[in-house]
Amino acid sequence: MNLILNSIMSGFASVGYSLLYRSPKKSLVGNFITGATGMLVYKILWDQFDMTFGAYLAASVVIGIVAEIFARINKLPATVFLASGLIPLVPGLAIYNMMNAFATKNFNDAVFNIANAGIYALGLALGVVLSSIFSKSLNNYRTYFKKVQEKRFMKKKTNKTKQK
């Protein structure tokens, strides 16, 4: 139950972020689903399999793919859905703990927390890049396939006209 509630609240956080930055109204449902799906994947991997980097990586890949899908459906840039979907996953606690450790001159904890925040941020960034590469390669494949189909159609059409 806590997993579902956490995902729903993350969806609302994503919608709140998108409203704050005045995203189009038709993107709100997509923003909710993107944020909730990303947090669901993250929490499953974090809680069930005790993953850190992998949880952030997988969640950001899923967010990127869902953002690309909603971008195609709503004819909006994927960034509208991607930015708001990633907000619940930002490692704010690790950054806060790092700043607190620096303020109290506890440098060992500060280095540990900055390393954790960096690893989490790297997982988020790498996941976004991987999902973007996947989307672009899929789009390129579809474009290539359409061109091949058009060439075949034109070749059949010219062969039929030559036979007559």
Image: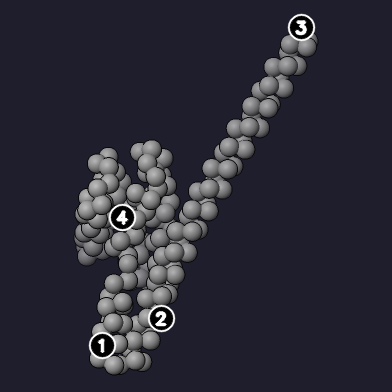
Left or right: residue 127 versus residue 80 is right
Mark nearer the viewer, 1 or 3:
1
- Residue 50: x percent and y percent? 38, 75
Mark 4–mark 3 distance (CA, rounded to whole Å): 60 Å
Tag 4 residue: 84
- Using a 10 Å C-alpha cutoff, classify the residue at mark 1 as few (fewer than 14 neighbours), some (14 to 19) or many (20 or more): few
Quick check: marks 1 and 3 in contact, CB under 8 Å?
Answer: no
Question: Which-is-in-front pick, marks 1 and 4?
Answer: 1
The reply to whether discs 1 and 2 touch (Cβ–Cβ < 8 Å) is no
In this picture, is 84 found above or below 102? above
Q: Amino acid at mark 4?
A: Ser
Residue where numbered disc 1 is placed: 103
Q: Does the rendering let one see residue 15?
A: no
Q: Which residue is mark 2?
A: 115
Quarter occupied by residue 124: bottom left
Q: Residue at x 54, y 45 (%)?
A: 138
